[in-house]
Amino acid sequence: MKRLFLIFSLFHFFFATAVAQVGEYRNDLAVGGSAGYVMSNVGFVPDVPQGQLGGITAGLTVRYTCEKYFNSICAILAEVNITQAGWKENIMDVDDNPVYYADDVNKVDPLSYERKMTYVQIPFMARLGWGRERKGLQAYIQAGPQIGVYLNESVKSNIDLTRGVANARASQVVAQDTLGIQNKFDYGIAAGGGIELSIPKVGHFILEGRYYYGLGNIFKNSKSDYFGKSNHGQIVIKATYLFDIVRTRNPKIK
């Protein structure tokens, strides 16, 4: 509950900062869609050796620009995305070699495991931009809280407990391979930046990078459970297109 209170307190701070009218007034509303690629893992304690699991994300975006304070263009935005996230294990022995089954004499089928989960993710962000608003390039940074709801998952694995292995796994942490997702509500902090190209009467084309750090855990984390921590970490590269619904009437805005 303390973490949940923290994340909504941060959202309140970002929101209040963005809408405080102390600069040049704006009343711009833009909506659109985005799509991108996600590289994700899960921060397990005890550690589970992993690589980055690839997935996709796509959804809707709403942005409200409220003011220009000195040279900073202040806005808030919200998204609703469908996102694939999870983890891909590096199953190695103590000599950092892939683990094979004893009957796999040609070593063509090393042990592998990956779990890909689908979430509805809803980030709320405060944004600061520098550059052109209506025609040209703008650079920006943004940050804020994000919540997510687990929908479903898929598992790709060739682990067969009835077959013996030729070389044992270096990591003896294996509970994550069979546990079902125990906490279906996720929350954390997202932050990133990017560039935006605005073309009059066409719209806004945006390319950005973002990192999400989960504050919640996918598995229970009491003293009697397997993991003390199991939170999401995600690197997101995405492209967004927005078109204007409402624009401030001011010929000085460029």
Image (cartoon, rainbow, N blue to C red):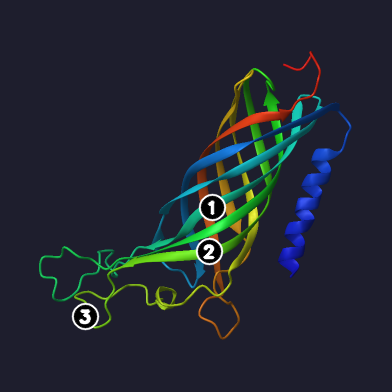
**Label 1 sits on residue:** 82
Q: CA distance from mark 1 to mark 3?
A: 37 Å
Q: For the residues labelled 3 and 2, say whether their Cβ atoms are less than 8 Å apart.
A: no
Q: From the viewer's perspective, is 53 left or right of 76?
A: left
Q: Which residue occupies the foreground of this view, 79 or 12?
A: 79
The three-letter amino acid code for the residue at tag 2 is: Leu
**Label 2 sits on residue:** 151
The three-letter amino acid code for the residue at tag 1 is: Ile
Ranked by sequence position, the earlier of labels 2 and 1 is: 1
Question: Which image quadrant: the C terminus?
Answer: top right
**Label 3 sits on residue:** 163
Q: Secondary structure at mark 1?
A: strand
Ranked by sequence position, the earlier of labels 1 and 3 is: 1
Q: Position of residue 88 (x, y in %)?
A: 39, 61
Residue 98: image tag:
none
26 relative to 216, above or below: above
Question: Which image quadrant: the N terminus?
Answer: bottom right
Q: Residue at x 55, y 75 (%)?
A: 182
- How dense is the environment of label 2, judged by Cα within 10 Å: few (below 14), some, or many (20 and up)? some
Q: Which residue occupies the foreground of this view, 169 or 180?
A: 180
Tell me the mark number nearer the camera, choosing from 3 and 2.
2
Tell me the mark number nearer the camera, choosing from 1 and 3.
1
